[in-house]
Amino acid sequence: MNEAAPQGERTRDRILTTAALLFSQNGYDHTPLSHVAREAGVSKALILWHFDSKEDLFRAALGRTLEPYRIDADAIAGLDAARQIERLVDLYVAFVSDNGYSVRFIVDLMVRHSAPDEVRRQVHDLYGMFRELLTGAIARGRDSGEFRPDTRPDLEAALIVTTLAGILMERFLEDTDQKEPTDELLRHLKRTTLERLSV
Amino acid sequence: MNEAAPQGERTRDRILTTAALLFSQNGYDHTPLSHVAREAGVSKALILWHFDSKEDLFRAALGRTLEPYRIDADAIAGLDAARQIERLVDLYVAFVSDNGYSVRFIVDLMVRHSAPDEVRRQVHDLYGMFRELLTGAIARGRDSGEFRPDTRPDLEAALIVTTLAGILMERFLEDTDQKEPTDELLRHLKRTTLERLSV
DNA sequence: GTCTATATACAGATAGAC
DNA sequence: GTCTATCTGTATATAGAC
């Protein structure tokens, strides 16, 4: 027997994982507790014993949904500035590709202004951290002479992340999950950015 | 008496307008018919006499919501290519500023894949038309010698609209309706684009 | 065309046995 | 901790009078 994970905890955990999945797939309003109960193999009453309300379950499940949302700054260590920028762009695109459902769900919450403040702040911070990484890479490239001396790292970084946000948006607007046109656009973004920055 | 607009038609129209507003403000799921009825000054039953179902009302109301969504190609006539690009960018930003609620609503429908096919197609077409206007302006600039001869109008236009989509996205991600940072970003977008295209 | 009253369904949440 | 049974509110939709 595993003393650290009694039955109740494991059941609670299964409810949480199930809820996180169903909420991100169907949305809060279209995920009745009965559905979560069925998929998790428990009764509605048990869910409401573990969590005070559906809203409470939702907030707890959001933690699961946001688990993969983190930035690994080490991933760009040891590269020159230009390569760091390219790598950050690729990491962004890879992330939204790998987390389609949940990214769509979180974006939906943000667009509808129905994300809890904590989530809103978390997303905001991640966005800021990513932009900071870009800003830092551009600043180092400028200071090392790799980029033009009149480069404005913050503004350039802001333009890049905005365009990436646009790529995300367009992915949602398209029904088909085509990636080929986006790839060409991505190459164009990276190329024009580096051409503009380079001396 | 106005023979062309009997009482029933005017009431139906008021229901439709009220519904379009409330749906775009609060969303479909959080707009009960009782709310529409109260705001429109009629009974729930009357709404369901005019429209077969809530879903039917919703589809009809979407027409109202999309009414302002159109592109006036004449607005850029007589300008040189660079000025046309700047003007199109400004028109885009002005539109999303003037139609905050409904743009947010439509985007939400698209993100959640819950827009009727007709609406999805309509938005897609508008997006395509706007990109076409940009593509045309860039192509004319290239052919007139104003822009570099190796310019690829379609790719450049795609990059611009993607960045604009990103600006829209970021406006949703921010809680505050600040516009100052966006303005600086917009200027940077226009300036870098034109610098890249110009000979 | 417009209303009041009602049918029907289903959601979240609670009571209480085990 | 987990269940079945039930309460309670609210939503869409219908019936039928005016």
Image (spheres, coloured by chain):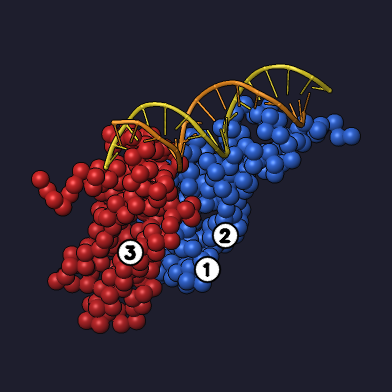
Chain colours: A blue, B red, C yellow, D orange
The residue identified by callout 2 is A97
Labels 1 and 2 touching (C-beta < 8 A)? yes
Q: Is residue B43 left or right of residue B111?
A: left
* Residue at image point 14% right, 71% down: B78
- Give the amino acid at mark 1: Lys
User: What residue is drawn where x is 50% and y is 35%?
Assistant: A116
Between discs 1 and 2, the one toward the N terminus: 2
- Comparing marks 2 and 3, which lies closer to the viewer? 3
**Nearest the eye: A125 or B97:** B97
Judging by the rendered image, the residue that carries numbered circle 1 is A179
Within 10 Å of disc 2 (Cα), the crowding (few <14, some 14-19, many 20+) is some
Chain letter for mark 2: A
Please tell me whether residue B188 is drawn above or below residue B80 in the rendered image.
above
Percent x, y for residue B110? 44, 55
Q: Which residue is mark 3?
A: B126
Please give the name of the residue rendered at 62% of the width and 37% of the height, measured from the top-left corner.
A33
Examine the rendered structure and indicate whether residue A80 appears above or below residue B39.
below
Contact? badges 2 and 3 (CB < 8 Å): no
Question: Foreground: A10 or B59?
Answer: B59
